[in-house]
Amino acid sequence: MHILLVRFSSMGDVVLQTATINWLRALLGPEAKFSFVTAQEFVSLLDTHPEVDHVIGFDRRKGEKWKDLVKKIDDLDNKEPIDLILDLHATLRSFRLKLTYWNIPALTVDKRRWERFLLTKIKSVKLKRLFNSRFFGLETQVERILKDFEGVFQDGRAKRRTIDFRKGPHQELTSLSELPVYPIPGEYVVLAPSASFLYKRWPVESFVELAKKLLNETSYHYVVLAGPDDKFCDVFNEIQSDRFHNLQGKTSLKQSMSVLAHAKLCIGNDSGMNHIAEAYGVPCLTLFGPTDPKFGFAPHGSNSRYISKEMFCKPCSTTGKTPCYRDKLYCMLDISVDEVKTNALEMMGAR
């Protein structure tokens, strides 16, 4: 069987779908083939993944047209006929792709849009406490995929393999390929201060203060990872220490993955960097602001943690990109540096 998985964005969501690939491999065995369609900027997340046979990138930033993507898929289909399309995005773009290949059977993930929207409309903290994530069908996104699709395979062998998968070596579920070690001296902790939307960022000044305190209280090195457009990370340059490394804009995605793969801990916002770190088995401390762990994107690693403040106004949107209507971004500002530091020290073993 040849399955074409579709998830165009974002970085963290693409990483989370590696759990689907790992599960399907455990389910269908070594004979199955898996191809993945995603945005070009995320191809390097998967192009060396041991369970992915082909990765097709769609580069709209450089003006690539829809017909160019279709040609790539046609070429693949002619060489290795596609038996099933697994739509893990459920957007108009992925619907268009399924419509283009109407003759190929397709399955579409339920993204729980209604449940997430409902959660944004409940403005009572006490009422929110009555409902856990499972009430809304908002388990971790990883578990959600398995729950939605495992019923497609009804035979006893498949059910047994799914049970074994959850308990077996893939207990962390997501995974990425091994990469050459990026040269950073000693053991280190990654700080990931960026996020896809401004309102999902813990104040960068808080990250700077956190870094200074951790440098004073531990012997670890500290590494900042952020993209070339994250110029706000220049404020880290005020930290003068041979154990502090500001790599903002200095690493490719592949190199950032390598840095994360060998970290002791990753401290960051609800963003793709934390998901990458977890895929390498690295514990994460995730800071949630306007989004909510109940959306299904909380860390799933057994040694990971998150900090999220209960507020009547939270979550205010399903993505975190909506401007805050209050005078301050309390959901982020109420997360203190000392609270993050205490959790980080506990997770690091206070070295």
Image (cartoon, rainbow, N blue to C red):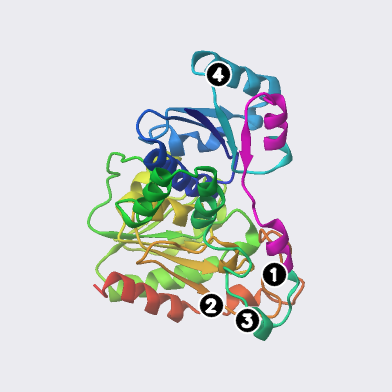
What secondary structure is marked by label 4? helix
Which disc number belongs to residue 77? Answer: 4
Q: Kindly identify the amino acid type of the residue bearing the numbered disc 4.
A: Asp
| Residue 142 belongs to the span the image colors magenta | no
Q: Nearer the viewer, mark 1 or mark 4?
A: 4
The mark nearer the N terminus, 3 or 2, is: 3
Q: Which residue is mark 2?
A: 335
Tell me the magenta residue range.
Answer: 94-119
Q: Position of residue 289 (x, y in %)?
A: 60, 69
The mark nearer the N terminus, 4 or 2, is: 4
| Residue 118 belongs to the span the image colors magenta | yes
Q: Nearer the viewer, mark 1 or mark 3?
A: 3
Q: Position of residue 323 (x, y in %)?
A: 74, 64
Q: Is residue 65 above or below residue 49?
A: above
Q: Kindly identify the amino acid type of the residue bearing the numbered disc 3.
A: Leu
> Counting other residues with Cα less than 10 Å from the Cα at mark 3, is it few (<14), some (14-19), or many (20 or more)?
few
Q: Is residue 328 left or right of residue 172?
A: right
Q: CA distance from mark 3 to mark 2?
A: 23 Å
Q: Which residue is mark 1?
A: 119
